[in-house]
Amino acid sequence: MTDHPSLQPYVDAWTQSMEAISELVTPLVEGEWNRRTECPGWSVRDVVSHIIGLECEVMGDPRPIHSLPRDILHVRDEKSRHMEVQVDVRRHHTGPEMTSEFEYVFIRRSRHLRNEKRGPEAEVTNVLPFGPRKLTLERQLMMRAFDVWVHEQDLRRALDTPGDLDSPGAYVARDVMIAALPKVVAKDVGAPPNSAIVFDVSGPVEFMRTVRVDKDGNGTVDGSVSLGPTATLAMDWETYSRLAAGRVRPEAVADRVKIDGDAELAAEILRHFSVTP
């Protein structure tokens, strides 16, 4: 337990997803570590390496000194280059080396969280090359819970082992993804003033949210029903989470998304739907 109950749900969600990942990868044979995931250019090994690397950085470990090869096609800017270092430095590690390091980092980070004395509003440094330089401890823990759940799902799809679509991490992911909707609809897409866009999501995590764009072009999101919305997008939770995490293109899941109302606006929203960097 942390000293602050408001942080505990994020710690619990993170812990559950980390345990699930450990169970998924421990029995893998060497070839299975090379299976492709929906993360561009990343294998199962690469996704686990990414998780290890970020948890190390959150604990204050120095970043590895490592020069990336020039032929990594999915590395296209400084952000992706920054993220790739922790991955590429482990690219030739064996399965047993990966599981051993993952378990060690998991133990260290769990102890680190148990000993956390700071409050939710404590300022911490963002270890990612995007977003604010500083953020609150609560936001950091929320985003770590979100990140490991999304990557747990990457691994599950790559290994054909579905599950945990309604785990604690799934609900953290839901909240993070919903919070990003006003920016997607109002700012990134530029939906018309006084419009209302409804997102109707079914499945293990079920919800309905309306994004309203006011006369000045500012967006808000709420759970109230909109009468005569400009557009409605209905889909299942797994499809929603894959689109919001940038794991699949809208055209690849068109048969799983039902659109009513302004189809052109809805299609534009889907093109800008990814909320992960």
Image (cartoon, grey):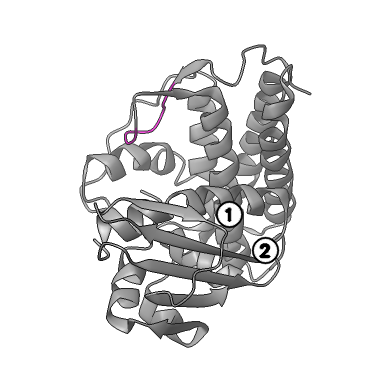
Image quarter hosting the N terminus: top right
On residue 205, the disc is 2
Q: Is residue 129 magenta?
A: yes
Q: Identify the residue at image location x=71%, y=59%.
A: 166
| Highlighted magenta segment, given as a residue range | 125-131
Left or right: 273 with respect to 190? right
Residue 262, x across and y down, in percent: 33, 81
Dot 1: few (<14), some (14–19), or many (≥20) neighbours within 10 Å? some
Question: Is 58 rendered above or below residue 54?
Answer: above
Q: Identify the residue at image location x=72%, y=64%.
A: 163
Q: Which one is nearer the viewer's eye here, 88 or 224? A: 224
Identify the secondary structure beneath mark 2.
Answer: loop
Question: Is 111 rendered above or below residue 252?
Answer: above
On residue 95, the disc is none
Measured Cα–Cα span from mark 2 to mark 1: 8 Å
Mark 2 or mark 1: whose residue is earlier in sequence: 1
